[in-house]
């Protein structure tokens, strides 16, 4: 057995070998293609350091899990205060989970009140879907094309990309999808009268940072209620200040019947998630002694997770992180728009607050014709990762592409990011775009293995 003390002394090569031998070897190979398999050993705020002493800016932010920054001292100190308490006692009511539930009821919009705590975003989605079915007595669930709600079976059935669903079919039955930001398509499906709930992200994150038209979410709320369906807002990535408001659905003054929150609920310190619903829905689903144990979990609402959650909410409020996200996000987009005027690789800049996506232009012209379209196929799958690779390996900026649209890289830093740190990222992108006038040039400089494998496909 490897002790913790020995584990903390392992070098990068040893960690890679352990993951290759005992973990996800394919993922190890994928990360290694772009030198993304570094060993990070220290983190604070927006900054992280690797085992070689190199400093990086984290503009990925744990896919929205680090709104308060890495290892926020106030949250770490909160955990020290509870270290002697039992972490979970099933035959009791966890005190801090009750407090966190009350605080969330105070902060969330509309009549949301009753909480069920879990450990991950997918678990929150699973609970929300089950709650919608039992509360309404209906079976159909509608989600949107291009959505991402997780990869457990129920959440995967709602996720809107075939790539992740196909290997696991048949999925959970009675799941349908409509285009995002299409009220008419939603109403046509709701008219059948069998819909338990419509689950939607206020902004599609993994879909490529897609923002709906103003009023879309409010119209969703009204349509769902008109046809007797519940409105589930998946705020797992957009919640807790990320978009410039505490929750993104507040931009439309929309009040969901169920909301899913995770990622930054504990400040990224401990796995924690929750779905919160109205008293009416909760009572229909679990509001009796006969029903109260129909949906349970072992670790949800444990002392450490709840303490971290209470402290994280305090940080978001006391440091005005939602307001800061809006200010820094506007600054970031202004700088990106200026950058866009100087280079031809950027097709579109989309975002709200500090959830920003850059979509790149596809290659055109003779070179793509010569390659038989291979260059376009490579660009669609790898251009985002190639830009992310250069940002990290040459300029010390950590980013990643979005899962459902790999031609988009996300800029999603902790909400404590500064203008100086944003300026560094803009300067890095400027240098990358100036030095790489085409996708092929970027591919050659970034990794020969990717481009050679792509051109070898038929």
Image: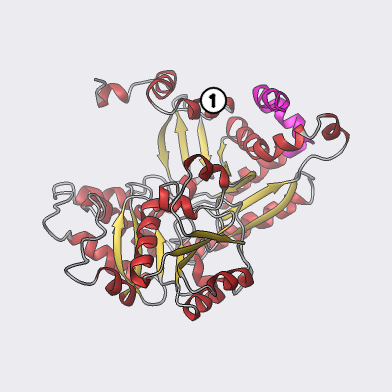
Q: Where, quadrant-wise, is the C terminus in this rendering?
A: top right
Q: Quadrant of the N terminus?
A: top left
Q: In this rendering, would 138 be left or right of 223?
A: left
Up-down relation of residue 435 to residue 134 (above or below): above
Looking at this view, name the residue that lies furthest to the right: 366
**Considering only vertical position in the picture, is 47 above or below 215?**
above
Q: Which residue is mark 1?
A: 32
Dot 1 alpha-carbon crowd within 10 angstroms: few under 14, some 14 to 19, many 20 or more: few
Q: Position of residue 175 (x, y in %)?
A: 49, 58
Say which element carries label 1.
helix
Visual colour scheme: secondary structure
Residue 203: x and y in percent read 56, 60
Residue 386 seen from this side: yes
Rendering coords of residue 301 (x, y %): 25, 55
**Which residue is more in the foreground, 227 or 433?**
227
Residue appearing at x 60%, y 55% in the figure: 209
Per the rendered image, the range of residues in magenta is: 433-458
């Amino acid at each position: 057995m490897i002790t913790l003390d020995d584990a903390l002394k392992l070098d990068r090569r040893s960690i890679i070998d352990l993951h290759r031998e005992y973990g996800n070897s394919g993922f190890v190979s994928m990360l290694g293609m772009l030198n993304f398999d570094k060993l990070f050993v220290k983190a604070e705020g927006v900054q992280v350091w690797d085992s070689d002493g190199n400093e990086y800016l984290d503009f990925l932010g744990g896919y929205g899990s680090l709104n308060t920054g890495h290892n926020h001292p106030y949250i770490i100190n909160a955990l020290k205060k509870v270290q002697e308490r039992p972490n979970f006692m099933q035959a009791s009511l966890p005190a801090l989970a009750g407090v966190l539930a009350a605080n969330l009821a105070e902060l969330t919009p509309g009549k949301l009140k009753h909480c069920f705590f879990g450990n991950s975003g997918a678990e929150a989605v699973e609970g929300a879907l089950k709650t919608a079915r039992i509360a309404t007595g209906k079976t159909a669930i509608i989600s949107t094309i291009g959505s991402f709600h997780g990869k457990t079976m129920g959440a995967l059935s709602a996720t809107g990309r075939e790539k992740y669903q196909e290997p696991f079919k048949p999925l959970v039955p009675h799941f349908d999808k409509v285009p995002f930001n299409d009220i008419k398509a939603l109403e046509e499906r709701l008219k059948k009268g069998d819909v338990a709930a419509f689950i939607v992200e206020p902004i599609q994150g993994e879909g490529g940072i897609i923002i709906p038209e103003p009023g879309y979410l409010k119209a969703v709320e009204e349509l769902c209620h008109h046809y007797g369906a519940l409105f589930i807002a998946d705020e797992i990535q957009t919640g807790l200040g990320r978009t410039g408001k505490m929750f993104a659905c507040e931009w439309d003054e929309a009040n969901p019947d169920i909301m899913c929150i995770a990622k930054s609920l504990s400040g990224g310190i401990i796995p924690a998630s929750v779905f919160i619903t109205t008293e009416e829905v909760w009572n229909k689903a679990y509001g009796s002694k006969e029903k109260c144990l129909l949906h349970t979990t072992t670790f949800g609402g444990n002392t450490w997770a709840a303490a971290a959650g209470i402290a994280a909410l305090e940080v978001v409020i006391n440091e005005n992180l939602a307001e800061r996200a809006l200010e820094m996000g506007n600054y970031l987009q202004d700088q990106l728009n200026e950058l866009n005027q100087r280079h031809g690789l950027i097709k579109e800049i989309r975002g709200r607050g500090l959830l920003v996506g850059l979509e790149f232009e596809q290659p055109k012209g003779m070179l793509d014709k010569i390659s038989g379209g291979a260059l376009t196929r490579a660009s669609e799958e790898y251009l985002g990762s190639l830009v992310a690779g250069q940002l990290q390996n040459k300029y010390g900026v950590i980013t990643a592409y979005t899962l459902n649209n790999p031609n988009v890289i996300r800029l999603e830093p902790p909400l404590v990011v500064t203008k100086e740190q944003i300026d560094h990222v803009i300067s890095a992108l400027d240098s990358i775009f100036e030095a790489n006038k085409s996708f092929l040039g970027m591919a050659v400089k970034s990794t020969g293995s990717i481009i050679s494998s792509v051109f070898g496909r038929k």
